[in-house]
Image (tube, grey):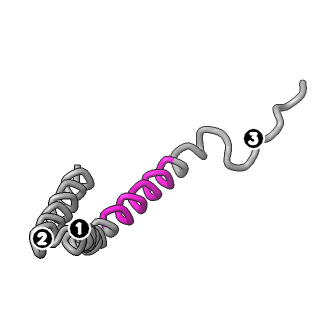
Amino acid sequence: MASDPPPEPGRGPQAKKPARARDRKIRKGVRNVHLAALGWNFVTAPLVGGGIGYVIDHYAGTYPWAMVIGLFLGFVSAFIDLIRGVR
């Protein structure tokens, strides 16, 4: 009567529980990185919107209206991303 070979390391019912815990830990880390990136979005989105508005103002001669609208749209974009990130 031949005995079954020993299971490979990291395989079998004993390995599933640590793998699930590791997967949860990785998902939590990825979520934390995404939430930390949202802070940068509050800086970059209004700056990009304001910069685009400034360029439009420069060529259209409408200073400061396009820049103000660009800043506003940048903040709106940042808040929308915040709401999506928290869900």
**Magenta highlight: main SS:** helix
Give the mark nearer the N terminus: 3 vs 1. 3
- Indicate the amino acid at tag 1: Ile
Distance Cα–Cα, label 2 vs label 3 = 73 Å
Distance Cα–Cα, label 3 vs label 1 = 67 Å
Q: Quadrant of residue 39?
A: bottom left
- Indicate the amino acid at tag 3: Pro
- Neighbours of disc 1 within 10 Å: few (<14), some (14-19), many (20+): some
Q: Quadrant of residue 61?
A: bottom left
Q: Which residue is mark 2?
A: 62
Give the mark nearer the N terminus: 2 vs 3. 3
Label tally? 3
- Neighbours of disc 3 within 10 Å: few (<14), some (14-19), many (20+): few
- In this orientation, which residue lies closer to the viewer: 54 or 29? 54
Q: Residue at x 24, y 50 (%)?
A: 84
Q: Pinpoint residue 71: horizontal percent, then vertical percent.
A: 16, 69
- Indicate the amino acid at tag 2: Thr
Q: Quadrant of residue 33?
A: bottom left
On residue 7, the disc is 3
Looking at the rendered image, the disc whose residue lies closer to the viewer, 2 or 3, is: 2
Determine contact: label 2, label 3, CB under 8 Å: no
> Does residue 52 appear anywhere in the picture?
yes
- Neighbours of disc 2 within 10 Å: few (<14), some (14-19), many (20+): few
Report the side of 67 relative to 1 (left or right). left
Above-or-below relation of 31 to 40: above
Report the side of 74 relative to 32 (left or right). left
**The magenta stretch spans residue 63:** no
On residue 56, the disc is 1
Give the mark nearer the N terminus: 2 vs 1. 1
Q: Residue at x 30, y 63 (%)?
A: 35
> Does residue 39 appear anywhere in the picture?
no
Find the magenta span and give its range.
20-35
